[in-house]
Amino acid sequence: MTAGPTHEPIDAVRYLANRSSGRLGEAIAEAAVGQGFETTLLLGPIPREPAPRWRRCPRFERCEDLRRLLASEWPRHDCLIMAAAVADFRPRQVQAGKLRRDGGVASIELESTPDLLAESASARTARQFVVGFALEPRERLEASARTKLSRKGIDAIVANPLETMDSTCIDGFLLLADGRRRDPPRSGEIDKGEFARWLMETLTPLLEVRATG
């Protein structure tokens, strides 16, 4: 389970980030434990301490930190739920010290970050299951999520509208690689903890089938 944003440094004091709170990822990890799964939570730089119930909760800051953690942790697990909001871009060069404001216009050259979801999917074995997330405007949510599901080569994807980012609620659904769509039993926005429990209840039989071949 991965959760939270990444912080991509600009200089010694500034970074590029997003508004991911990590709440949904933590909730899904908690639901997985409730389902009896031995769960590892890879958690990004959120402004609160993770709950003490996590025996294994490695932390990351940058995309590269998470990449290294996935390289060591993913081969030992049966399922990857990639809820972390990894930055799509990072500064091409990190400035030493602190950039000064001299009254002019500053520019930062950006480069794409590695596609950790696609990398993890391509490295999986036949028994491993990968779940991604799509955060998109509501009007193109399902179409964009289905495209991402196919492009990344993953097994399932949670589609989530933009306005629920950094919220305590979510209005999402699950798409499977075989074309099926699964929706929570209650429509509209629901608490992230409730959604997480529904998601794990939905995924568990799929994971059991995959694990038995």
Image: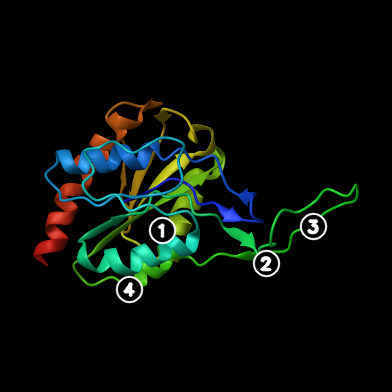
What residue does disc 4 label?
A: 123
Q: For mark 2, give the secondary structure.
A: loop
121 w.r.t. 98: above or below: below
Instruction: For marks 4 and 3, give the CA distance.
Output: 36 Å
Between 93 and 205, which is closer to the camera in this rendering? 93
Q: For mark 3, give the secondary structure.
A: loop
Disc 2 vs disc 4: Cβ atoms closer than 8 Å?
Answer: no
What residue does disc 2 label?
A: 93
Instruction: For marks 1 and 3, give the CA distance.
Output: 34 Å
The extreme right residue here reads 103
What residue does disc 3 label?
A: 107
Q: Earlier in the sequence, mark 2 or mark 4?
A: 2
Q: Which amino acid does label 3 sit on?
A: Ser
Instruction: For marks 2 and 4, give the CA distance.
Output: 29 Å
Residue 30 percent location from the top left of the image: 24, 39
What residue does disc 1 label?
A: 149
